[in-house]
Image (cartoon, grey):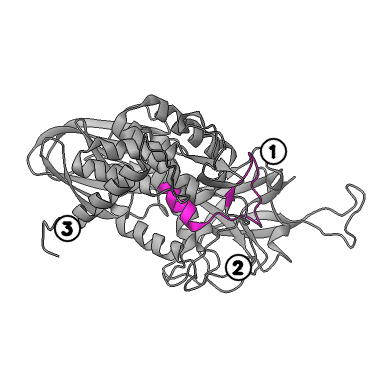
Amino acid sequence: MRLNDDRVLKSAVRYADYLYDTFGPGKDRKWACDHPEIELALVELYRTTGDKKYLEFARHILDQLNANGGWVKPINPGEPEVKFIRRKELFGHAVRNLYMASGASDIWAETGDWNFGRTVERLWENLVQRKMYITGGLGSRQAGEIIGLNFELPNLLACAETCAAIAFVFWNHRNLQVTGEPRYADYLERSLYNGVISGISLDYTKYFYENPLASLGDRRRVEWYDCTCCPSNMVRLLGSITGYFYSTSPEGIWVHLYDAGTAQIVLPDGRRVRIVQETEYPNDGRVKMTVEPADEARFAVHLRIPNWAEKVTVKINGKSVKTRFQPNRYLSLDRVWKKGDTIELILPMTVRAVACDPRVLDNYQRAVLMRGPLVYCLESTDNPGLPSVFQGAIRSGFSAQMTTVRGFKPSIPAIRLKGLCLKTSDVLYHPLGKHGKPKPAALTAIPYYAWANRGDSQMAVWIPVSK
């Protein structure tokens, strides 16, 4: 096709007009696709053409979708309609619900309708506080790939489809652009570095459809699926990932994610700024940014301070910035920038243990090892001293060291600590306290995204905590 060829756009408009004239607001015929993605396309068509009927149609379709019987699907004849703005939680097919929610965020962005906004935030908060895996994965039931009930988060039987984690990235990015709230960037990052990239092997040739948080050694990535959504969706996300790092506003540049690379940024007033990031993040917390405006100019660079970061250090041209840092905030560096100015951001990458709400039964008296945004897991490949990774335990007052393990090129940071090996019993049930005391054991944990890359192996994310 030639540059500026509008034949595809005209075709899309004709089809959208047909759907609007047949099923749009005020029409007797009800219709909505039970895999909600047309709403996203309709909003983009509105953005391209400026015709508000496409925005109105997208909202009309959302109001015809209802979480019923474990699926997001059109309302059946005689079934009471539940307007989108009255929904309180997402329940049903994970990917479909998250695409529906992404469409709602797009409508919110274009209309500024706070009824929509409050609903989006209500659904998001319920999801991250009661239904999300610590990896940023979504979908607790393999049967139907369903987001289940509050605190229903089994580890071994988790679905956590790769496409659901990708859709969660989409949704968080949209909410971030609407609100500017860093919590959305934090969860985008968590899902990206854990629930998403665990879905592809380190050599980029094999894929997971599901991403459980525990394995008996029977889970393997494969080259393809009859349902090809996850491999192709992964390619789409990785191909567009550069668009998630920066945003602009009249105040300046917003830095959401950290990784090595170069960005050519155009501010709203037309000024051009080049930013070069040098870093090994998320393996290392040191980030160096070189700011190169086309001409010396005043604007702000807003750095996201992740919600896990404390005692952050920031330097401009080698001099420490004296300010009060708060996690889960953007730090504003407002000054006259000239070519070659540098920003150094040092984020603490200490190993920490994260506990879970006791209402999640699988995780009671267990913890997850995290470092920066990365979730870690025990894999049997690195723990030959344990009869099973499910017998590995950590002490509440553990100390950890960083190390490397075999089988990864390039190497990835692993965690080594003195833990315990829980004793087992010869019988299934026994009197409390009679199964013997745990023995000391060395434990090694690797980033969750890297498991199942060195042959069949057991794996556990949630680790028992013992005295």
Residue 415 placement, left or right of 46: right
Which segment is the magenta one?
146-169
Is residue 105 in view? no
Q: To which residue does mark 1 refer?
A: 359
Q: To which residue does mark 3 refer?
A: 7
Q: What type is the residue that disc 3 sits on?
A: Arg
Q: To which residue does mark 2 refer?
A: 219
Task: State which mark lies toward you, 3 or 1.
Answer: 3
Q: Looking at the image, tell me whether mark 3 or mark 1 is earlier in sequence order.
A: 3
Q: Secondary structure at mark 3?
A: helix
Q: Residue 48: x, y in percent?
A: 20, 44
User: In the depicted view, which residue is nearer to us: 94 or 168?
Assistant: 94
Q: What type is the residue that disc 2 sits on?
A: Arg
Q: Secondary structure at mark 1?
A: loop
Per the rendering, the mark at residue 103 is: none
Splitting the image into 4 quarters, where does residue 47 fall? top left
Callout 3 touching callout 2 (CB < 8 Å) = no
User: In the depicted view, which residue is nearer to us: 417 or 12?
Assistant: 12
Q: Secondary structure at mark 2?
A: loop
Q: Residue 212: x, y in percent?
A: 59, 57
Is residue 203 in view? yes
Estimate the spatial distance between the alpha carbons at disc 3 and disc 1, rounded to whole Å.
Answer: 55 Å
Look at 37% across and 48% down and name the residue there. 38
Q: What type is the residue that disc 1 sits on?
A: Arg
Look at 38% across and 42% down and name the residue there. 103
Vertical placement of residue 448 versus 26, above or below: below
Which quadrant of the figure contains the N terminus?
bottom left
Q: Looking at the image, tell me whether mark 3 or mark 2 is earlier in sequence order.
A: 3
User: In the depicted view, which residue is nearer to us: 323 or 30?
Assistant: 30
Which quadrant of the figure contains the C terminus?
top right
Mark 2 surroundings: few (<14), some (14-19) or many (≥20) residues within 10 A: some
Residue 389 placement, left or right of 309: right
